[in-house]
Amino acid sequence: MTTTSTRSPRLSQWVAFLVFSTITMGSVIEVINSKNENENQSKSAQNWSLFCSITTFLVTLTIVSMHLHPIASILIVGTKIEGGITILLSIFWVATVSVVTDSRRGLAVDEFGAVANGNLYYFSWAGFLCSITLLVNYLRHVFHVDVAGELRSRSARLTTWSGLLATSLVVMGSSANFYDAMCGGDDDTGKCSRAVFGIVLGAMATLAALAIVGMKIATANAPFLVEAGMAFMLVTLFGFGVAFITSEKGPGAPLGNLYYFTWGSFFLSFMILTSCFEDYNAASRNGVENSSSRNHVNGDDTINAMNEHDGTPNHTMVDSLDSQI
């Protein structure tokens, strides 16, 4: 077991990827063979999802089999072949998630953006996350590039801002999909206006997060007041967002991308604001402690200097300093 773990550091992840792709493949086939075909279902979307899931199933099955064979594992574990496959599959699943969870395609979600096929929706996202995890793990073990560690050490909250950037993009895109699919005529329910709010909110949050991430990458820091101010603004805006977008009359009321990522954006922005507040309190405490320490050292130096002057202490000055202290 120890030898297998050493030679196959990503075996468990490849097995998980095999499971996720298998479930996704079966769900896509079920959707295609469904008798109640939705008019929004696109043949190209179905073909792409089927091609990606079948390809991933065959590739992951082959790689898992090679991992379990002592000789074949040498040809795949930690090689450029494994790296190239992980990159290719990551690209595949970025496109697959975009297609499968698009309300205009009618595969995993319906025209309202609600989850219509739970297995296809959740396991396509699981496959995407697994592909990214595999790529990060490969880079860390083979090239010693710790992506997560580099983000954490580069600057405080850089990882959280990067996550907020991604979730805000999904909020903007999902709101735009809802508006394109459902709006254009009379809007008696007000969902279209709230979808517009989601588009604007996602765009503003994307620009704000992109600006902070850019500053942190370029200079390893961002002005604290700017970062804290943006975090407070985004917490406030996403507070209104979850109220208007995910409420019963909002476009994100059904469980889907818009619902999950609006709430995710709110929690991430709240985490950033909380972290900024903690840093401010820590800096304030350190400032008070340093000021007190400097005053104490200066007082001791003054007393010592007066005691050493001509070898006789100046009792008047010492008493005056003591009274001041």
Image (cartoon, grey):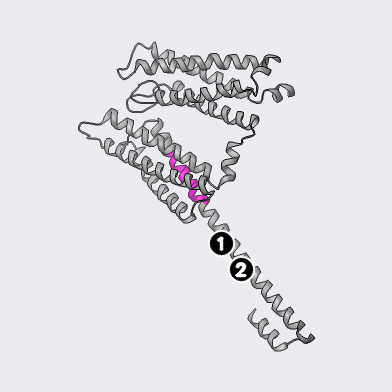
Viewport quadrant of the N terminus? top right
Q: Give percent across and percent down for residue 251.
A: 32, 34
The residue positioned 55% from the left and 16% from the top of the image is: 59
Of callouts 2 and 1, the N-terminal one: 1
What residue would you read off at disc 2? 291
Q: Nearer the viewer, residue 250 or 165?
A: 165
The residue positioned 39% from the left and 49% from the top of the image is: 236
The residue positioned 37% from the left and 40% from the top of the image is: 202
Please tell me the numbered disc located at residue 213.
Answer: none
Check disc 2: other Cα within 10 Å, few if <14, some if 14-19, many if 20+: few
Task: Inspect the image, locate mark 1, and give the three-letter code of the amino acid beneath it.
Answer: Ser
Q: What segment carries the magenta color?
A: 263-275
The residue positioned 59% from the left and 14% from the top of the image is: 62
Q: Residue 264 lies in magenta, yes or no?
A: yes
What residue would you read off at disc 1? 284
Q: Main secondary structure of the magenta part?
A: helix
Please tell me whether mark 1 sits on a helix, a strand or a loop: helix
Viewport quadrant of the C terminus? bottom right
